[in-house]
Amino acid sequence: MERVRAIVLGAGFPLALIVLWHAAVVSSGTKLVPTPYMVAVMIRDFSFGGVYDDAFSGTILTHLAASMARVYGGFLLAALVGIPLGLAIGKVPLFRQLLDPTLSLLRPIPVTAWLPLSMVFFGLGPRSAVFLVFLGAFYPILLNTIFGVRSVDPRLFEAANMLGCDGASLFRKIILPAALPSIFTGLRLGHGFAWILIVVGEMTGVPTGLGSVIMDGRTLSRADLVITGMIIIGVAGFLCDRLIVAINNRVLRWSPQHHG
Amino acid sequence: MVDRRPFLHIRDVSKTFTIGEERVEALHHVDLIVDKGELVCLIGASGCGKSTLLRIVAGFETPTLGDVRVYDAPITGPGSDRGMVFQDYALFPWMSVRQNIAFGPTQKGLKDAPDIAGKYLEMVGLSKFADRFPYQLSGGMKQRVAIARVLANEASILLMDEPFGALDALTREQLQDELLEIWTRTKVTILFVTHSVEEATLLADRVVVMTAGPGRIESDNRVRLARPRDVSAPDFNDARRALTERLTSHVRRRQLRTAA
């Protein structure tokens, strides 16, 4: 009963919004915003073709693959740099003293403010998008890793020391696993930012990618294409987040309170 | 040939902590010799430095003056010959019970680490729970794992810091019995911090009474009761009462002084 209620309420609200959207478009007679039905037709054409047969028909996989390659390229790079750096800053005073002030100064700069410079560094193209994604995912991963390391129960270090574990193996055997719940929080946050920034990154003259589809839709005054791009990013981001949560729950099966 | 050197020798140990501007003398010229295989309880009001003394023996703290020696070799830091059992267990939450117990032997690179873990799993009666994570265990079971973990590491001195303080009365009694059984079987030396006179009377060969302000040894009392001890026997009661008087006499003296 409780389940049925959850489904009815959870699915009912977006359905009601769609109905409201339809009614608003029809009653106002606007030509700028498509009806939900027109968007559905566009999604079908974008996915399988056969309706409009234009440059966008049946190209979903090309754009999705391009965007995902950039999102996960930047995201993995951010994790690869952010986690080890976070472990070092969290545990080694030298690294903290050396890097903390600089990072604190750079962190408040919105990632989108890097856009012009990243175009200078990497030119107009996908590498600029990957850089933005990297920056956006990097800080949450780094900061949560640092936090995770700093909140490890000191008793665990003592226990590890007396059992003959110190030095470099302390990082791998104690600090990394103990900080994992925080690291996963950082990964999930960073992953969300990565999907946000891919759109910004791809609006800078990249020929493929969901962000460029949205940009093209705007240029061509095709709101149905814009909304299609938005919906696909939403669904892809949501599904990938669920995947991360599933990995999180598997890796952190020793700590049910950290399950997503 | 019997080794005439003292086994565990705490030599004129003083410890001063500096908290902000204030200097607190936690231990004041403490001397204590513990023979191999002895079970010695440290008892005293909070602030008497009994836990600090235990942490110095463990190597987690360094004494301000004096030193601690095992067979004349000064202790310079945590080592696998001395295993601490913490009140809050300090198990590695991401490791199964078996992995926790095997941690020390694995660190040493022993090939038969799994067999060693199996042996101690059986000794503490947790073979059936070998693959559980700490969060799936009761407090009593966690403390059994903590004891097995240091025994598996071949610690010759067990340092126990109010290990049963967080357990309910029934579990505590059970664990006290099991500890005595393990002690008889393994001939391990035990330094046991408690605030319970009854626990000290039940377990100890010797009860060292400590007093606060600054922490020092007030008296060293041999418990001359045959084992197994019966807490309801009259001679047990006498021994406990004598010890309680030892523990409270200086408190009363001080109160009288303050009143006068």
Image (cartoon, rainbow, N blue to C red):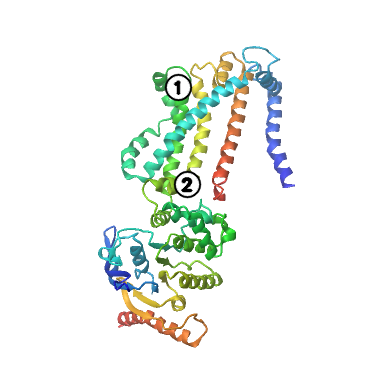
Specify the label residue A128 is tagged with.
Answer: 1
- Residue beneath the point at 51% across and 25% down: A70
- Residue A58 in percent (x, y) is at 65, 17
Instruction: Residue at the far top: name it.
Output: A54
Between A183 and B97, the residue placed more toward the observer is B97
* Label 1 SS: helix
Tell me: residue A190, above or below residue B193: above
- Residue beneath the point at 51% across and 55% down: B114
* Label 2 SS: helix
Of discs 1 and 2, which sits in the foreground?
Answer: 2
Q: Residues within 10 Å of mark 1 (few under 14, many from 20)?
A: many
Quadrant of residue B155 in the image?
A: bottom left
Instruction: Residue at the far bottom: name it.
Output: B234
Quadrant of residue B256 in the image?
A: bottom left
Tell me: residue A214, above or below residue B54: above
Give the residue pinned by disc 2. A177
Left or right of A239: which side holds B113? left
- Residue beneath the point at 46% across and 48% down: A178
- Residue A28 in percent (x, y) is at 68, 21
- Residue A184 in percent (x, y) is at 51, 41
Work out whether residue A28 can be spotted: no
Residue type, label 2: Pro
Q: Residues within 10 Å of mark 2 (few under 14, many from 20)?
A: many
